Image: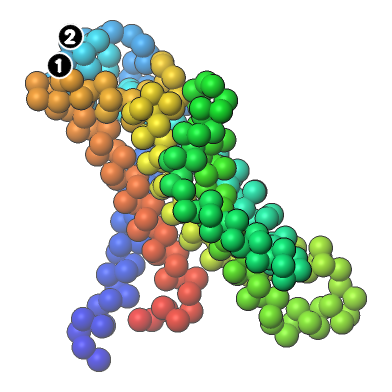
Amino acid sequence: MSSDTHHTPKRKNVTFWLSLVMVGAISLAGILSFFWTPYALSDMVGGRLEAPNATHWAGTDRLGRDVFTQLMIGARIALIVGLGAVAIGAAIGVTTGILAAFATRFLDDALAAFFDILIAFPTLLVAMLVVAAREESSLGTAILALGIGLSPIVGRITRILTKQVLGQDYITAARVSGTSWLAIVFWHILPNIVPFLAVNLALQFGLAVMAEASLSYLGLGAPPPNASWGRMLQEAQGTVYTAPWGAIFPGLALFVLVIGINLLADGLRDRFDPSKRGV
């Protein structure tokens, strides 16, 4: 056994814990913002475009507002949007995916094709269409739009996983014993597919956070005074050369959360996939 192979599990373990630290730090900031922030979000507490200092850890923006306070609020919005969009996407996707797996062959093929068609459209484009249809931009609209945009991906994966479980002998035994299909779904299918779905949902969380930042950057996300990281980037683009911290800090926060989520998903996949254990 080569030394590289010997150290692979150790490296994966370190990466997994690093991802927990990255996601945990952003999550802690977001949760803490519900109870405390250094300053009120809209208060002009310093001079315009102050560099990071002991009073304002991340500097101030062009209106004299504390950037670190906005970063904390942005972390809160990212968590709310990510969790909300994943919850909506999972509710729609898991339900339709399981129904497709149980449907007749014709309906199953039709739903599979429908999933593929929707997946062909970028999630951000679907979200923009939903926001445009509602003719308003709000945090709730962004969550709903992103949840709808993510649901076809979840539905397709749920359908594939469910069909694999339905092919197992214990499902046949359960049917022969008189177990209802509803009981089979809750007692046999969901417990077997949830670990693998968790990996995909973690990735969808990161995608939702990126999409929300993009919507806010375009002015289609949470409206002011919400301090979305995307809106912070949009507001800082005019002063990126004179006060780069206004763009660096929200961009760095977005990078840390998304990369952390992706590394966490990789770690979960390694733990849930028996073929990767001990590699």
Q: How many marks?
A: 2
Q: Is residue 201 visible?
A: no
Provide the residue designation for mark 1: 50
Q: SS for tag 2?
A: loop
Query: What residue would you read off at disc 2?
Result: 47
Q: Looking at the rendering, in which quadrant would you find the N terminus? A: bottom left
Q: Nearer the viewer, residue 123 or 190?
A: 123
| Quadrant into which the C terminus falls | bottom left
Residue 46 x, y percent position in the rendering: 21, 10
- Pinpoint residue 121: horizontal percent, then vertical percent: 46, 48
66 sits to left or right of 197: left
Instruction: Sort mark 1 into few (<14), some (14-19) or many (20+) by Cα contacts within 10 Å.
Output: many
Residue type at tag 2: Gly
Closer to the camera, 216 or 50? Answer: 216
Residue 52 vs residue 104, the one in the foreground: 104
Give x and y (percent) for residue 165. Answer: 66, 75
